[in-house]
Image (cartoon, rainbow, N blue to C red):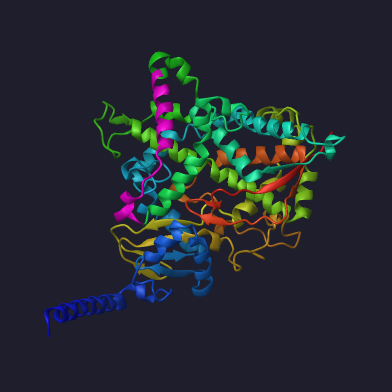
Amino acid sequence: PNLLELSVASCLAIIAALWIQKAQKEAASVYHTIPGPWYAPWTSIHLMYLYYFGHAWKVHEGMHAKYGPIYRLGPRQIFISDKEAIRKLLVIDDLRKTSVYSAVARQPEEAGLVFTSDKDRHRDLRRLMSPFFSIKNLASLEDRFAWALRNLIDEYDRAVQASPGDKMTDRAITVDLYNDAARMAYDIIGTTGFGQDFHLLDPNAKDSEDAMRFVKIPYQGTKWFVQRFGLAFFKPIRFLFPLDTDLFHTLEDLVSQRQNLIRDDPQSAADSKDLLQCMLTGKMKATTPPRAAPAKDGSRPLERREVVSQGVELLLAGAETTSNTITYCLMTLLKHPEKLKVLQDSIPSVPIDAELPSHTACRENELPLWKPSQYLDACIKETMRLFPVTGELGRTTSREPATFMGHVFPPRTAISASLRTVHRRPDYWQRPDEYIPERWLSDAQERGIKPADTSAYFPFSAGTRNCIGMNFAWQEMRITITTLLARFYISEVPKQKLEFRQFVTFQLKLGTGYQVKLTPREA
């Protein structure tokens, strides 16, 4: 045989030996007992494709339907949909997040509250930011919530005034609810988080270069989210994909402006009471990475780059998550007009230009328009069951083995909670694929409906990593849906093609939206 033949034979022999070694190791491992597709033990390339294009959620649903509550989709990638196992994963064992999350950050060591995999860093960041997310502080920010929502309603009012029709109630306008809700949510984050109007609902924004810089934030944020999460599985070659960092530059300017204000007018800066002020003046343990020289009390301020990265996370995780749920709630109600009627009939109608009363004033005066609505809350909860903010929550076993569903998994095993599946399991939920807000009502049993199984429900995650902005989100969703339904009858524009993608959040395909028609309820 010549040299070429010997080389080929040697390569084939090496490949065969490696394959046999891998097969023997696989046969002896605990992973071998986990059901899954034939290719799962051998490669994770398919995971790169699924997550890069946002199609993984479809595969997870199909795999759980085929293999049951636990299955394997990669060499060390396990997915579970058992409610007790998920609670153990998130609450009892409290395993740390997989490195995929920190890969979304600009640099892993800069990862903030949402994306850091470091449990100590997460604990200290949460302690630092908790005062901002307290119910008392959120109450003090009511005027900022109302300001952004007022701008959206004014935009709709201008469109109604410009529409043909003798009476206001004859004038229907078509709006993109999905993107409008996102613009409003980003403006709320801008004013409450950074003390800055992002001008997303400003009709004169195009006339200002400074305003236009902020108007680009939603697109920049979504683009960063999609790019970064998709490339999280391509770590060795990520440098080949240039990323858009304009969003970071915009926030760096905001941080610089606030730092100058703290230096020149500390009292005025303190009056801001927003999250940026909280981050710039708060302290965390000096032992929390990235480690810095400690003060006498063993603490340190957040570094500038940490503040910027945390600000980006706030925008990405705090805006679209809430606005998407608002859209999905109204979208689902439109497909169930009898339930939409029940909700809308419980909300008194008001003119479009009616004042937006604060929650505090309404609680004190017991105004019926803003009294807490059990049915509205039920509609939102049912929406978050069918459309959870994220389809899965990934965790990883630490240096010690961990037991789940009778299997002992070795260290460095990625175990993901399949939230979409556990929220739709027929053994947990009556008619799981149907939209039944009544299952959340206190009299569900009397209505002949099996009450919601709250132990199989994880809309804001669970355990130490549950959503710190949960109260913030509830306030925004309640205010927005009530305000819209008090002023408008809503109907769906037919024949829309909706394509969903799952990156960190469950969202519509980039560049698309959801069109609805709004008709004033009052003249």
Is residue 522 depicted above or below 515 in this figure? above
Quarter of the image where one finds residue 31: bottom left
Which residue is drawn at the image coordinates 59% and 63% (left, top)?
Answer: 424
Position of residue 430 measured from the top left corner of the image (x, y, whole percent): 66, 65
Q: Is residue 29 visible?
A: yes
Q: Residue 224, how many percent across, how many down?
A: 44, 44
Q: Judge whether residue 248 is colored magenta.
A: yes
Position of 302 compared to 63: left or right? Answer: left
In the image, 391 versus 121, the foreground residue is: 391
Dividing the image into 4 quarters, which one contains the N terminus? bottom left
Q: Residue at x 66, y 29 (%)?
A: 360
Q: How many marks?
A: 0
Q: Judge by depth and name the residue closer to the eye, 102 or 471.
A: 102
- Asked if residue 135 can be seen in this view, the reply is no
Residue 183 placement, left or right of 250: right
Most common secondary structure along the magenta stretch = helix
Q: Residue lying furthest right in this view?
A: 166
Residue 165 vs 33, above or below: the answer is: above
Q: Nearer the viewer, residue 49 or 1?
A: 1
User: Going by the image, does 251 lie left or right of 321?
Assistant: left
Q: Residue furthest bottom?
A: 1
Q: Please tell me whether residue 449 is drawn above or below residue 476 in the rendered image.
A: below
Residue 500 at x, y = what percent?
56, 56
To which quarter of the image does residue 432 belong? bottom right
Does the stretch in magenta take in 255? yes
- Split into 4 quadrants, where in the image is the C terminus? top right
Percent coordinates x, y for residue 112 in the rendering: 39, 41
Judging depth in this view, the residue of 244 and 140 nearest the camera is 244
Identify the magenta region. Answer: 234-260
